[in-house]
Amino acid sequence: MEKFQQSMYDLIVETSTKLPKDVRRAIARAKVRENAGTRAAMALDTIVGNIQMADENVSPICQDTGLPTFKIKVPVGVNQIEMKKAIRAAIVEATKNGKLRPNSVDSLTGKNSGDNLGEGVPVIKFEQWENDYIDVRLILKGGGCENKNIQYSLPCELEGLGRAGRDLDGIRKCILHAVYQAQGQGCSAGFIGVGIGGDRSSGYELAKEQLFRPVDDVNPIEELRQLEEYIMENANKLGIGTMGFGGESTLLGCKIGVMHRIPASFFVSVAYNCWAFRRMGVKIDPQTGDIIEWLYQDGEDVDFAKELEKAEAAAALEQGDTRVIDLVPPLSEEQVRKLRVGDVVRISGMIYTGRDAIHKYLMDHDAPVDLNGQIIYHCGPVMLKDEDGRWHVKAAGPTTSIREEPYQGDIMKKFGVRAVIGKGGMGAKTLQALKEHGGVYLNAIGGAAQYYADCIKSVEGVDLMEFGIPEAMWHLRVENFTAVVTMDSHGNSLHEDVEKSSLEKLAQFKEPVFK
């Protein structure tokens, strides 16, 4: 079991820090499709750079290392109880070493366990089989994409598509709608797993199980093969694009599975996964605990180091008519009102992290620091403390901003905050507050945790650690932290525009395709 524990630790580290070959090829194809000099191209350049940095640093690709989910097939007679203990010990070690962010939170008290263990965490599912080796698969699915999972009960009415019936064409409509509703909030361009049938829980489980399939495999069921190909061709016509910036690449993979159902229920369940598609697998010798084979290693690898030589994000940003503006907080209202949607900003100076717990706290309490003119970063970083007691940032990409919609506008007005950084955009309430108060929303590239960690030059302090590392308020000194203005103080929202445009494009798929 000691060797098995080491093998599980190696699997966790590899899954968190290195994308498998099939995912890399899908991202490379998306990069080729995209038009040079666009915001989407810039985002893909940043993503490519981030992947390469994670490889070199052996650090998390995305700061949200998700809820570890293991699917394990074992020969008859293998001690699953001891295997579970070894996996949990490996999880603790990986968290301690900064390969996983402490993500396990008590749902009643809100307390973070600090070691990624808790009731139901990690998820470990065993299945016996008659092969003579152990098959272990791991997926790290972050909260941003997990929140964009969706389930449909047929028949139903779908925005832009009309009635979806209990047939293959109704399923088609549900899948297209699932891609549409995710917009950029799930870190598009993404992958989806679809489960047809089952009950509400088994349908979602089947959908997530599809994410363990290789991106390039072929569905053995002919109707589903055709449907997968149809979705891949047409979802990319919605124009949502990478990060929801608009563009040619909205979906990188679609896998569909089917199971029986009871007559009264017809569920279509969709598991959405971000571009940082972290899933790996190994074959284990049950006698020694050694890894005998790594899975998802078939086919050509992509050398992203060469891709980086072709185009760095900053160079791509400065093409064409894009304005690149340097900002040093604290910011004045006059400075902010000069910014327009589409502008690119490079921030140097102090920024302060704030996620769900911080925003809820600030509604009823004073801020621990003076936030007048400052920037709040929607981020839950991976942090490690050295032997001298100093904190170091291991990963620090943006989290999904829409969760802060109930609070954001009020907090900006209350404390004089001039800008927020996040991903996926915010809603009408925040947009109105930006207009009234003189504020701006800056979209960073979701999942690019190494790229942004490199922009953070020092940790100057931290407050409210009682909320746990991801939810604390970190004081970060940054240099050339790059983001795109996607909501400005003049009532403009790129997210609103893309959503409206993609809804219009979605409507073209209203008519039946499959009989």
Image: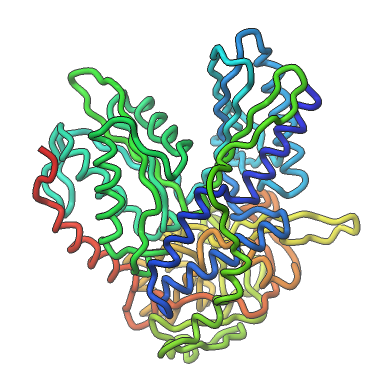
Residue occupying image coordinates x 15% and y 35%: 155
The correct choice, above or below, for 9 with respect to 504 in the image is above
Quarter of the figure with residue 48: bottom right
The correct choice, above or below, for 498 with respect to 231 in the image is below
Q: How is the image coloured?
A: rainbow
Quick check: 193 left or right of 335?
left
Name the outermost residue toward the top: 77
Residue occupying image coordinates x 52% and y 88%: 325
The correct choice, above or below, for 258 with respect to 426 in the image is above
Q: 444 or 228, which is in the foreground? A: 228
Instruction: Give x and y (percent) for residue 175.
Output: 27, 44
In the rendered view of the protein, which quadrant contains the C terminus? top left
Instruction: Give x and y (percent) for residue 152.
Output: 25, 37
Residue occupying image coordinates x 73% and y 73%: 457
Name the outermost residue toward the front: 300
Instruction: Specify whether residue 365 is in view.
Output: no
Q: 328 or 196, which is in the foreground? A: 196
Instruction: Give x and y (percent) for residue 190.
Output: 42, 53
Quarter of the figure with residue 85: top right
Instruction: Give x and y (percent) for residue 295.
Output: 59, 37
Q: 492 or 132, which is in the foreground? A: 132
The correct choice, above or below, for 228 with respect to 236 in the image is above
Q: How many marks?
A: 0
Q: 127 or 226, which is in the foreground? A: 226
Residue occupying image coordinates x 57% and y 87%: 326
Quick check: 345 left or right of 240?
right
In the rendered view of the protein, which quadrant contains the N terminus? top right
Quick check: 240 left or right of 507?
right
Instruction: Specify whether residue 215 is in view.
Output: yes
Quick check: 225 left or right of 339?
left
